[in-house]
Image (cartoon, rainbow, N blue to C red):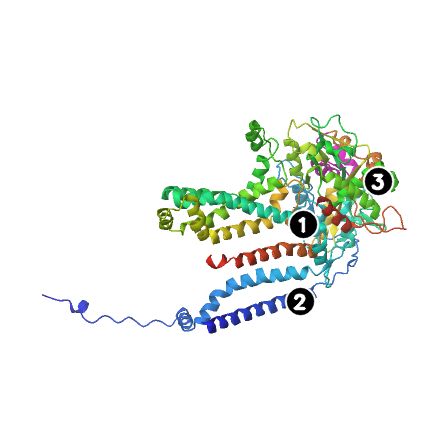
Amino acid sequence: MTHLSARRTRIRSSILTGLAIASVALLTACGTGGDTGTGGAERSEAPTELAENEDTVSILAWPGYVEDGGNDPSVDWVSAFEEETGCMVTSKTYGTSDEAFNLMKTGEYDVVAASGDASLRLVAAGDVAPVNTDLIPNYEGIYDFLKMQDWNSVDGVAYGIPHGYGANLLMYNTDAVTPAPTSWDVVFDESSQYAGKVTAYDSPIYIADAAMYLMTHQPDLGIENPYSLDETQLAAAVDLLKAQRENIGEYWSDYLKSIQAFETGDTVVGTTWQVIRNSLAEGTPAEVVLPEEGVTGWSDTWMVASGAQSPNCAYAWLNYIASPEANAQATEYFGEAPSNQGACDFTVNPDQCEIFHAGDEEYASQIWYWSTPIEDCLDGRTDVKCTDYSDWTTAWQEIKG
Amino acid sequence: MAVDTASSGQRIPVPPHRDTLARRGSITLSAHPRLRLTLMLSAPLLWLGLIYIVALAALLITALWTVDSFTGTITRSWTLDNIITVLTGSLYQTVTVRTVGVALLVTLIDILVALPIAFFMAKVASPRWQRILVIAVLMPLWASYLVKAYAWRSVLSQNGIFEWLVAPFGGQSPGYGLPATVITLAYLWLPYVILPIYAGLERVPDSLLEASGDLGGKTWATLCLVVLPMIWPAIIAGSIFSFSLSLGDYITVNIVGGANQMLGNLVYTNVGAANNLPLAAAIALIPIVIIFGYLAVVRRTGALENL
C-alpha cells in the first residue's frame, strides 16, 4: 500500500516536473521571440503615391463613427463607400481611448479614429504612420484651426485627418437641480447637496476636468493647462476628486449606463456628452449647459496604422470620411461638430452646425481637448517635470478607492 | 420424428476475424493498460496543463515584468516592484478587504438561505414537488448572467420594484452600492450553494432522523447534532463556489455597485484602461492566494475528504 502510494507520488511529481519544464520552455520562447520593447519604434514614412485599392479595410472607431445600417437601417454611410471604392469595411468600436490604444497593438486594424489622449501615444508607440495629406483631396475643405494641431501632428508632420470635435458638458436634472447651474461647482465643492446622485466619467483623463475647475477656483496653484500638472497640482486635483468621490453615485464610461441613470433619476448631475442628452427618452427632465469655467472635450483624428494591410483603402476611407456628405452624417449621428466646412450643408437638422458651434473658432478655443499628459510639460514649463499618464492612472484608481 | 440435424448438431464455427487496423489497435490497447490510460488521460491533462497551470505560471512571470508608461510596451526585465506595490499600497489593501468582506457576506447569506430550501427539497417535499423545486432552482441558470445583473439594476433603481415594495412600510431601496452588490451576487450564486447542500441532505438517511426523535432529540438538537455534521462537507463545497465566484467578480459591481470597485475591477482597469498587464497580473495573484488559503483552511477541517 505504502509502496503503491509512493510510486503514485513519484509519477505525479514527474508529471508536474514535465509540465513545469514545458511551460518554462514555452515562456522562454515567447520571451525571446518578441522585441524587448524599448519603445519609440521605427518611424514609418508616409506614402508619396497611391496604388490600386485592395479588397478590404479594417477600421477601429468610437461607437457611431462607422455605421453600415446594422444598428439603424437609415444610418448608413459605409455602403456608399464600399460601392464607390470596392473596399469592403470591417469595423470594431471601443469605449475608452485606452481600449483603442490596446487594440491598435494587435496590428489588425488599418485605420483608427483616435482622440487626443490616444493619438500621441499611438505615434510614440509607432503604431500609426504619418499621413500624406496631398493624397487626400477632401483635406482642403477642413477647418484650418483643426489642421496640424498638437494632437494630430508631431514636429510638423501630419499624422491624420481631423474628424470632428465636441465638449464634455454638464448635464443636470431640471427637477432636482435648481436653480440651473452655471458652474462645475455642483459636481465639486457643492456636490454634497446631491450626495449619491453625482456622476463622473470613469477614466484617468477626467482628472483634467478637476484641474480645469481649479484653474478658476484656486488660481494660486498656477495651472496653465489641465493636461500639464506637476506633482503639487496633481495632488490638489486628486484631493478635489477624492472629496467628490464621497458624493458620487456611480461613474460611467458606457454611455448607455449614463442614459439609463439619468432617465431613472438615480443620477441627477454630472459630466456628459451631447449625444447622451440627445438619446434621453422623451420627457426626461434633463438639460445640458456649458459651465463658466470652460469644458474639456475631444477632437478626433483618423489615423492610418503603420503596418496597415490595405493602405490604399485606408487612404480612400480617410478621403471619404472627410468629404462634406460623409462627415456630416457621421458627426451628426454622434453629436459633435464636423471638421469639414462644407458638411453643414448636408446635415439632416439644418441647425446641427449651430448647436455644436461648428467652425466657431472662439468656441473651439474654449475647449481643452483631451491630450495625453507626458513628462515634458505641455504648457512649456521646463523647470519641473510634469506627471504622465501612468501617474494619472494610479491616481485615478486611488480616487475611486 | 424428423430432427433437423443441421440446427441441433455441431455449431457453425465463428468465421475468423479479418485483420483490420481497428482490430489490431484494439488488441494492442487491450494488451497494454498503460498505453490505454495515457491515451485516455492525455487530452484532459493537456487541457489542465496548458490552460491552467501554464496560464498560472505565465501570470506569475508577467507580474515580474514592467511596462513602458508612454508607449505601452512590456519591458521584459525582472523586478519585484509590482508585487511590492500590491502588498504595500493602501488602495490594494482597502479593495482586498472590501472584496473579501463582500465574498464572505455573500457566502453567509447564501448558506443561510440555501439550508432551509435544501432541507425542504430533500426531506419534506413529495417526489413530484422535489422535481419541480430542482427545476425551479436550476431555472435562473438558463438566463444569462448579464441579464440577471441588469435586472437587479432596474429592480434596485430609485423607481424600481424594490422601492415600490418597501415604500409603504417606510423603507427605501438601498440604491447602487455595496449592499446592492451583495444582494445581486447572493442571488446569482444561490443555485450553486443549494445544489450541493441538497445532494448532501439526500444522503442523510431518514432513519437517522427518526432514531434521533425516538431517543428524545428535539428538532433543534437533531438538526445540530445529527444533520449538520453530516452535511458539513456539502456546505463547504457550496461555500467554495459562492466565495470564489464572488472574489473574482467585476461585472456585477460595475452594474449595481455604484462607485465601488473590487479586485476584479482593478485587474480589469489595469488590463484595459491602464494597459499595465504586469500590475494586473500582480493584483490577480491576490484572489489566487486567498483562495489557496481558504482551501487550506477547509482542508484542515477535513471537509474535503468527505466530498
Residue position for label 3: A145
Q: Chain of mark 2?
A: A
Specify whether residue B91 is painted magenta: no
Q: Is residue B186 left or right of residue A390?
A: left
Residue position for label 2: A28
- Determine the residue located farthest toward the front in the rendered image: B216
Q: Which is closer to the viewer, label 1 or label 3?
A: 1
Q: Which residues are magenta?
A: A324-349
**Gap in angstroms between the C-alphas marked 1 and 3:** 39 Å
Label for residue B266? Answer: 1
Q: Is residue A378 visible?
A: yes
Q: Amino acid at mark 2?
A: Thr
Q: Amino acid at mark 3?
A: Phe
Q: Position of residue B203 (x, y in %)?
A: 40, 52
Residue at image location 39% in from the left, 45% down from the top: B123
Q: Are marks 2 and 3 on the same chain?
A: yes
